[in-house]
């Protein structure tokens, strides 16, 4: 399938989704939450690319965009999503590591609220 340059990204903070949108339709997303209380962080929980859109680099572009949003806000990212964590391992220059206490706080918040998952 040919790569498309028409994919845009929409941050729906209220819903906790960073959407990849092509031709007006979602083709992938990162489900995330904002760590409550200081220190704030964006916590990636799940990355999904819709069937038929795999293999086009959409998931990687989602994670890259997610890190860009966090950088613009001056907050760390905690990649609890297995795909995001794998992407981070391959792109450490684009994905600063969150401090250990922030990672622990994100894991605790996720464990205490199943609606976040």
Image: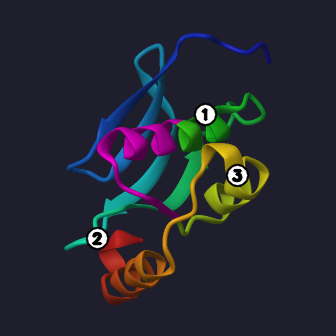
Front residue (pair 74, 2): 74
Residue drawn at 48 percent across, 49 percent down: 30
Q: Earlier in the sequence, mark 2 or mark 3?
A: 2
Residue drawn at 35 percent across, 55 percent down: 75
Per the image, is 69 magenta?
yes
Circles 1 and 2 in contact, beta carbons < 8 Å:
no
Residue drawn at 43 percent across, 55 percent down: 31
Find disc 3 in the rendering and name its residue: 92
Q: Earlier in the sequence, mark 1 or mark 3?
A: 1
**Dot 1 lies on which element?**
helix
Q: CA distance from mark 1 to mark 3?
A: 15 Å
Quadrant location of the N terminus in the rendered image:
top right
Q: Residues within 10 Å of mark 2 (few under 14, many from 20)?
A: few
Quadrant location of the C terminus in the rendered image:
bottom left
| Quadrant position of residue 42 | bottom left
Front residue (pair 115, 86): 86
Find disc 1 in the rendering and name its residue: 61
The part of the chain drawn in magenta is 65-78
Q: Which of label 1 and label 3 is nearer to you?
A: 3
Report the colour scheme.
Answer: rainbow
Find disc 2 in the rendering and name its residue: 39
Please determine whether, in this image, residue 63 is positioned above or below residue 27: below
Please determine whether, in this image, residue 110 is positioned above or below residue 19: below
């Amino acid at each position: 399938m040919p790569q498309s340059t028409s994919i845009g990204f929409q941050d729906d903070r209220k819903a906790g989704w960073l959407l990849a949108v092509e031709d007006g339709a979602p083709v992938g997303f990162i489900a995330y939450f904002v760590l409550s209380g200081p220190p704030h962080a964006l916590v990636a929980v799940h990355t999904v690319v819709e069937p038929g859109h795999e293999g086009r680099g959409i998931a990687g572009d989602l994670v890259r965009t997610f890190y860009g949003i966090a950088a613009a806000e001056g907050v760390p990212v905690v990649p609890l999503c297995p795909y995001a964590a794998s992407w981070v391992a391959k792109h450490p220059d684009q994905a600063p590591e969150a401090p250990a206490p922030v990672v622990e706080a994100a894991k605790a918040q996720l464990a205490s609220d199943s609606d976040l998952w």
